[in-house]
Image (spheres, rainbow, N blue to C red):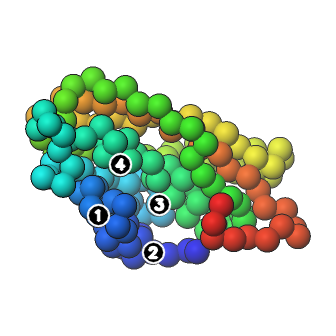
Amino acid sequence: MVVSENMLKWGMRFYPPLFFQRIWVKKFDKGFSGVHVKIFKSFLNINYNSSIFGGTIFSGSDPFYALLFDQILQRKGIKCRVWLKSASINYLKPGRTSLVFSITLTEEEILEAETALRTVGKFIKAYPINMFNSEGVLCATVINEVYIRNLFKGEEHTIAY
């Protein structure tokens, strides 16, 4: 479904799996070329060490590359299925304050995916995410592997992947 940047921002802010973990979409860039996210430290997501629960940090990274690619490619008229194929995380420092991260897709990255979809029919690539605390210290690095498949004529497009 094609939506505006503002509509998806508000939808993601109140999407229960993100809302209750205090994962807050600050903004989607124009044309869905990027996203800016904050993970608030809260009594809802802290562990016994008073740092943000690792599962919350990992969850914060999960949907965003897939969402960006999905919205961009739909606007280009490419019917596709996009999902996170795999992910890995490296916790470097405890999240003792709120964490922030930004993702930006360049025109070259978008063109690479679009070309692969039009020629091979699928695209798989890993992308990094760096999460920083309020002092600007790197606390976690995540690698998200995105899988995109072109939906050929005759295949039914469904919401559930």
- Left or right of 33? Residue 123 is right
Amino acid of disc 1: Phe
Q: Secondary structure at mark 2?
A: loop
Q: Which residue is mark 1?
A: 19
For image coordinates 51% across by 45% down, the residue present is 106
- Left or right of 65? Residue 43 is left
Where in the figure is residue 144, as x and y percent of width and height? 51, 38
Q: Disc 4, disc 3: CB below 8 Å?
A: no
Mark drawn on residue 4: 2
Q: Secondary structure at mark 3?
A: helix
Distance from Cα at disc 4 to Cα at disc 2: 21 Å
Specify the quadrant that holds the C terminus: bottom right
Distance from Cα at disc 2 to Cα at disc 1: 20 Å
Mark 4 vs mark 2, foreground winner is: 4
Specify the quadrant that holds the N terminus: bottom right
Where in the figure is residue 13, as x and y percent of width and height? 31, 67
Quadrant for residue 130, please give it.
top left
Q: Which residue is mark 4?
A: 60
Q: Which residue is mark 3?
A: 32
For image coordinates 45% across by 48% down, the residue present is 62
The residue at the far top in this view is 92
Amino acid of disc 3: Phe
Distance from Cα at disc 4 to Cα at disc 3: 17 Å
Amino acid of disc 2: Ser
Q: Tell me which label, 2 or 3, sits earlier in the chain.
A: 2
For image coordinates 37% across by 61% down, the residue present is 17
Distance from Cα at disc 2 to Cα at disc 3: 9 Å
Q: Tell me which label, 1 or 4, sits earlier in the chain.
A: 1
Q: Tell me which label, 3 or 1, sits earlier in the chain.
A: 1
